[in-house]
């Protein structure tokens, strides 16, 4: 059936996030048996993405072993339930008690995770989700199938990250979707052959996607897909555009801040997809959010490598519509984040980001 998806279908039908629901107001906590149960608060999930562990050859994607353990210690001491991504998505939709919840994801399958990161997860009895690109399994810097099998035995979920981890947006439009689908299917086949399991979750290479890629991921049977814009997941988040906070040495001092971050409730976002519109060097993002409980006079917006112009378009007790725009061109970078934050009346901070992708930069 997947093979019958035509390019026309992929280009016409894009996914839409479900209608946003307002957050509840007050939070009461009850600590029992080292758990924190949250009453009168909707479910949220904070997700982190790591790459290398204790490998200082690549500082931009590396976390020291010491700092990674500090992250796990903090989650444990503060009674977070740490789940695999699949289990977290099930938790989000079921009727279980609301708890502080975190997900640890790792991209690409480097050996340093097996040597330095995995032993700490095992020590703290925490699961994680590892997204692998199957073409590199067993290569010099990457884990072997035997090592990956050991991870699955010990509670690590395996997710699909395509076969080659290519820049699919740079392929010709009439070829990219076929290539993308072929790679997903090949990767699923190899994982099933070697690990005797079928991944339920997917991560877009480099966090890059469009409506066609999203449609394929849905149709292939995954229950969710991770991107690389930062933010917090709630029940109204599009599960095929899941945000994750990046964690490397550059961000490690922000771990506690991000772990305690809450989501902004987005009623509407335009555009919904990340590709920079043709001819727009300073693209405009239009957001409508639910302002309930927020200190809207303290809204802040940020743009990577630029400053941000925020303009309120319409305001009511139930909707706050605004535009965000970089003050200088973002076309010198392949990926640029627009981020919006605001505190609530209790002093908790809420976060949303939109990723812009400029495929002309490689």
Image (spheres, rainbow, N blue to C red):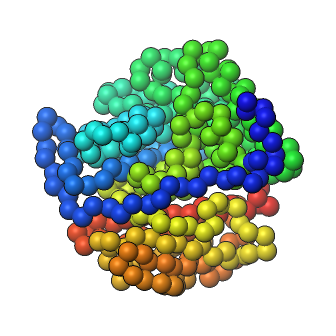
Total number of numbered discs in the rendering: 0
> Does residue 114 appear to the left or right of 330 in the view shown?
left
143 up-or-down from 77: above or below: above
Instruction: Give the position of the C terminus as an image quadrant.
Output: bottom right
Q: Image point 48% across, 28% down: which residue?
A: 157
Residue 296 lies, in percent from the top left, at: 36, 79
Pick the residue in front: 66 or 213: 213
Pick the residue in front: 61 or 31: 31
The quadrant holding residue 145 is top right
The quadrant holding residue 186 is top right
Instruction: Give the position of the N terminus as an image quadrant.
Output: top right
Report whether residue 252 is seen.
Answer: no
The quadrant holding residue 120 is top left
Residue 312 lies, in percent from the top left, at: 49, 84
Report whether residue 160 is seen.
Answer: yes
158 up-or-down from 5: above or below: above
Pick the residue in front: 268 or 294: 268
Pick the residue in front: 317 or 166: 317
Q: Image point 56% across, 47% down: which residue?
A: 240
Q: Image point 67% across, 45% down: which residue?
A: 215
Q: Image point 38% across, 56% down: which residue?
A: 258
> Does residue 92 appear to the left or right of 209 in the view shown?
left
Residue 211 lies, in percent from the top left, at: 69, 52
Residue 59 lies, in percent from the top left, at: 55, 49
């Amino acid at each position: 059936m997947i093979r019958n998806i035509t390019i026309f279908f992929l280009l016409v039908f894009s996914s839409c996030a479900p209608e946003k629901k307002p957050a509840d107001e007050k939070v009461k906590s009850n600590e029992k048996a080292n758990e924190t149960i949250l009453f009168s608060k909707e479910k949220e999930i904070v997700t982190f993405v790591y790459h290398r562990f204790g490998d200082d050859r690549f500082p931009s994607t590396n976390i020291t072993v010491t700092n990674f353990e500090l992250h796990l210690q903090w989650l444990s001491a503060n009674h977070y339930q740490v789940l695999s991504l699949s289990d977290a998505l099930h938790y989000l939709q079921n009727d279980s008690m609301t708890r502080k919840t975190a997900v640890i994801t790792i991209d690409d399958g480097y050996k340093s995770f097996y040597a330095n990161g995995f032993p700490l997860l095992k020590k703290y009895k925490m699961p994680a989700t590892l997204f692998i690109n199957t073409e590199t399994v067993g290569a010099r810097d990457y884990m072997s199938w035997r090592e990956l099998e050991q991870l699955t035995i010990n509670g690590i979920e395996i997710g699909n990250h395509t076969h080659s981890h290519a820049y699919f947006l740079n392929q010709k439009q009439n070829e990219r979707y076929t290539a993308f689908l072929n790679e997903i299917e090949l990767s699923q086949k190899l994982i099933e052959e070697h690990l005797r399991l079928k991944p339920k979750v997917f991560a877009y290479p480099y966090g890059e996607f469009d409506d066609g890629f999203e449609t394929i991921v849905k149709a292939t049977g995954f229950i969710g897909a991770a991107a690389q814009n930062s933010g917090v997941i709630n029940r109204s988040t599009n599960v095929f555009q899941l945000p994750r906070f990046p964690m490397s040495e550059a961000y490690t001092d922000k771990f506690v801040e991000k772990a305690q971050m809450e989501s902004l409730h987005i009623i509407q976002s335009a555009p919904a997809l990340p590709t920079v519109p043709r001819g727009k060097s300073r693209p405009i993002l239009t957001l409508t959010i639910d302002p309930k409980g927020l200190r809207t006079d303290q809204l802040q917006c940020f743009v990577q490598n630029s400053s941000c112009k925020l303009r309120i378009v319409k305001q009511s007790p139930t909707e706050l519509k605004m535009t965000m725009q970089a003050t200088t061109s973002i076309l010198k970078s392949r990926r640029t984040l627009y981020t919006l934050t605001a505190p609530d009346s209790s002093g908790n901070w809420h976060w949303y980001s939109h990723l812009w992708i400029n495929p002309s930069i490689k």
